[in-house]
Amino acid sequence: MNQTDAKGRVPAARVASRRASDLFALLATLAGLGLSIRMAWASDGVYHDDDLTHLQMARWAWQYPEYLLNDWGRPGFTLLYALPAQPGWLAARAFSGLLTALTAWLVYGVARGMGIRAACAAPALFWVAPMTFSLSYTTLTETALAFYLSAAMYLHLHGRPRWAAVLASLFCVTRQEALILLPIWALATWTRNSTRRGRWTIPVTWWLLLWAPVAHNLLNLLFVGSAPLANLLDAKPTAFYGHGTMLTMLERWLAAASPGLIALAAAGAPLTFRRRGGALWIGCGLAYLLTHVLIYRFGLFSSGGYARFLVPLAPILAVAAADALSAFLEPIRARWARARTGVGEAVARVADEFTPHNVSAIRGMLFRIAAAIAVLWVAAESERSPWLWWGTRTPLLLVVGASLVLAWLRLSRGRALALLACPALLILSSFGQTLAQSTPHVLQEDQLMVREATDWLRANGLSARPILSANAWVYQFLDLSQPPARLKTLQRLDRLPPGGLFIWDVRYCNQPPHDIPLTLIQGRNEFAEIWHGGRHTRDGIYCRVFERR
């Protein structure tokens, strides 16, 4: 709460501090947005081919509203992007940047609502998570989930629990594994309204938590004939994506969030947990991380175990890291506060000494930073981490280890500035990793070969014919739309009319759910190959065009 004087006025110094905090957070938010839009302008490709499929479903939803219910497309994403996807890639990329910037500002609101003194650092810490920035100029569901999570927490902290529940309900229709967050949110609602007067609101809030998945399943039953809930009940392992160990997703988290940010957040997480709303915030993060660890450990739900799946944890990491930074800055802040009140130099010097409470808190954070780095080291070694940046692990750990030792030895001498070396190095290492990983998304070799096929179709006046492909890039390059597929690609191939064209590609036709190997299509007399493209570096001839006779 705001401190006031005897007349109920907020002190001018506090108002100035609040304005400075708002300004710093706003500048960090806008700086990230500007860099994101610059990357969007320079991009013509994707981070992952799923980006394109999500964009197409959102764009085609106006023509085929059934895409709004498509479980693979994720309604929480499709509804959000249905309008900005219409002008095309650049508008959708820019919208992702705006959404990420809004999330950064909401993260600031969450940190401030929890009473974290260094809340203004939270937007910058959010942006320096490497994949948070990389996904801000493409179209993936993780960006949308991070926004919903931050907005719901902001509303929860600012006295709007029912509106928070409305947004929280969208978690599991944006990313299915986020269903695990709903029971945690329901428990937080119970504890928040445990008084007799507030208990009547609990059933209302719980219903609001369920409205999106209930509506999604009922509408699918009504218009599509199947319920997405069946997919959640079918958790059997699949061989296509394989599985990992209990450390695999931790190792991949290094690429998504960086070891520096994870270690700093680990230091601040217990502090955040004890704040108002902190148990819900940290609980959601732990539950989401553990869910992905277990899903990929056992190869469930056909999960690819991609690092990007952990991007929605970035808001939670940013808030916890800001809390740790606050604790490191507290001795310096206390000294400045005393100096401003006009006390003598001797008293100000005494204020720089660490109290027993500060010593205990800071030593606890140092232990947690060291433990987090050790766990991340083990995960990277056991998984033989392929990330290029991890080649700098030895100097990084030596520098961080030296700063920890220096900070520990200086605690008894009251040198607060020495402590800043530790969070500063962690933040700088995260920023460096973000710079190394963040490049424009450009078309790759396989996508360029698909474009070669579509260019040939246009040049020969064939692009107006009925066209079928398992590769979404064919429809993108030809600017075509297609209705939701209720039949498998092979069944649709059987229904292709004479004169229709089938664009076969190495990657997608050879994998589920399409399963159309080259020998199958070449063995059918009704199809004749009329063109093939150049040779892929790895896969030989990548694209072929077949005509139905």
Image (spheres, rainbow, N blue to C red):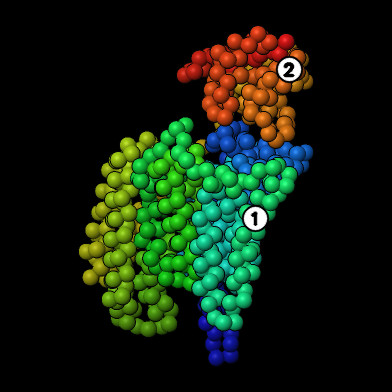
Look at 63% across and 23% down and name the residue there. Answer: 490
The image shows residue 18 at horizontal and vertical percentages of 54, 71
Element marked by disc 2: loop
Look at 32% across and 37% down and name the residue there. Answer: 384
User: Mark 1 = which residue?
Assistant: 214
Looking at the image, residue 60 sits to the left or right of residue 325; the answer is: right
Snapshot quadrant of residue 477: top right
User: Mark 2 = which residue?
Assistant: 500
Mark 2 or mark 1, earlier in chain:
1
The image shows residue 528 at horizontal and vertical percentages of 66, 9
> Do the residues bearing badges 2 and 1 touch, measured as CB atoms within 8 Å?
no
The image shows residue 70 at horizontal and vertical percentages of 66, 42
The image shows residue 305 at horizontal and vertical percentages of 45, 41
What's the amino acid at mark 2?
A: Gly
What's the amino acid at mark 1?
A: Val
Tag 1: Cα neighbours inside 10 Å, few (<14), some, or many (≥20)? some
Look at 68% across and 10% down and name the residue there. Answer: 526
For the image shown, how many numbered marks are present on the structure?
A: 2
Element marked by disc 1: helix
